[in-house]
Amino acid sequence: MSKAKGLDETKIDKIAKSHMPALGIDLGGTNIRAAAVRDNEIITETERIPTPDGRDNIIEGILELISKFQKDVLVGVGIATAGIVNGDTGEIIGSTGNLPGWSGTPLKQVLEAKLGIPVHVENDANAAGYAEARIEALKRKRCVVTVTLGTGIGGGIVMHGRLFRGANWAAGEVGHIKIALDNKRLCTCGLFDCWEAYGAGRGVIQTAQELLEGVTEAQSPLAKNVDEITTYEIFDAGDAGDIMAQKIVNRWHEHISHGLVNIAHILNPDCFVITGGLSENIDFRLLEDMVADRSLPRVGESIEIRQSALQGQAGIIGAAQFVSDEFLSTRK
Ligand SMILES: [Zn+2]
């Protein structure tokens, strides 16, 4: 008996599984969070545990989180982690300051053997970029670059809906673009004058310390405790009208714009999405003007710079959505 058109086994399998959620897990230096995701949206409560110390304990923690979800209705598990990740083997191949000993972990292999369902491991900035570029307003764009501003600077490049990973999985490591000469600031990577040495949290602090040199407490309350100054104090003082703080924040915007301009001239993106803990302090209008001023007209004029729509959820969503999309693309 011939089968009805469109109802062969592969298609039945696809229909049955295509709307199953995937589990997304975001492994950060402070905590590990997990939630089920469907159609680029979180559809369950987010479960979380503090990130344990050491490779084996982290893997145990991930398995503990997964056990809180019903595995047999999941199409697979996606994990967003710090570090450079081989997207084929799911091995962490680049070192990560926040997760000592994590480099070298064959995470996909270990988890698939325990779970029996597909696992995909992705760099966290890539996962966030993948989710951001899939929101309704951006999913038909040619090139979307997501920049994560926090303790470091990460990047996720999505071209025509696909993540661009480069020759050795390290594309989008935009935090290490060089934006100054003369070896002024040492980056955590060992190189000098990387973008994140200026644009990430500790970069803002170093800029503040340089600009506050010789400033008295009467001129700016920020001068009181320069050695232990925090980004919160700087941004709060700026909001409260402190001229020195505003100068520091403005200089930070210049630093951010330098990195964006460099990326823009190589990739000519439609849009930058800015996310991460420091992104809420960005004046997006000012930043767009700075980028346009410093770019060739064809490059800078049309670039939109937008705040993340997904914020802290982007890693979970992107990692999970990648698993769902991979499933569908292999079953077409
Ligand atoms: Zn660096």
Image (cartoon, rainbow, N blue to C red):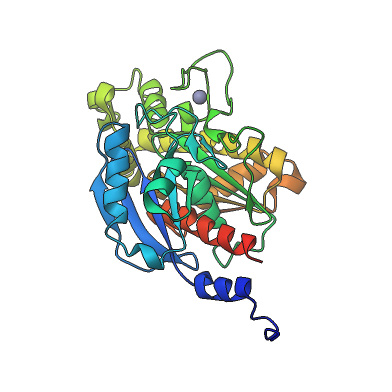
Q: Is residue 266 above or below residue 141?
A: above
Q: Residue furthest top?
A: 182
Q: Position of residue 287 (x, y in %)?
A: 54, 45
Residue visible at 58% across and 66% down?
Answer: 137
In this view of the protein, which residue sits in the foreground, 186 or 119? 119
Q: Quadrant where the C terminus lies?
A: bottom right
In this view of the protein, which residue sits in the foreground, 182 or 57? 57
Residue visible at 32% across and 33% down?
Answer: 55
Q: Residue furthest right?
A: 298
Q: Is residue 229 above or below residue 133?
A: above
> Could you tell me how many numbered marks the image carries?
0
In this view of the protein, which residue sits in the foreground, 70 or 175? 70
Residue visible at 25% across and 38% down?
Answer: 52
Q: Residue 276: in sight, yes or no?
A: no
Q: Position of residue 31 (x, y in %)?
A: 28, 44
Report the side of 35 relative to 154 (left or right): left
Q: Residue furthest front?
A: 1
In this view of the protein, which residue sits in the foreground, 33 or 65? 65
Q: Residue 47: in sight, yes or no?
A: yes
Q: Is residue 157 above or below residue 46?
A: above
Q: Position of residue 85 (x, y in %)?
A: 51, 37
Q: Quadrant where the N terminus lies?
A: bottom right
Residue visible at 43% across and 22% down?
Answer: 188
Which quadrant would residue 105 be assigned to in this image? top left
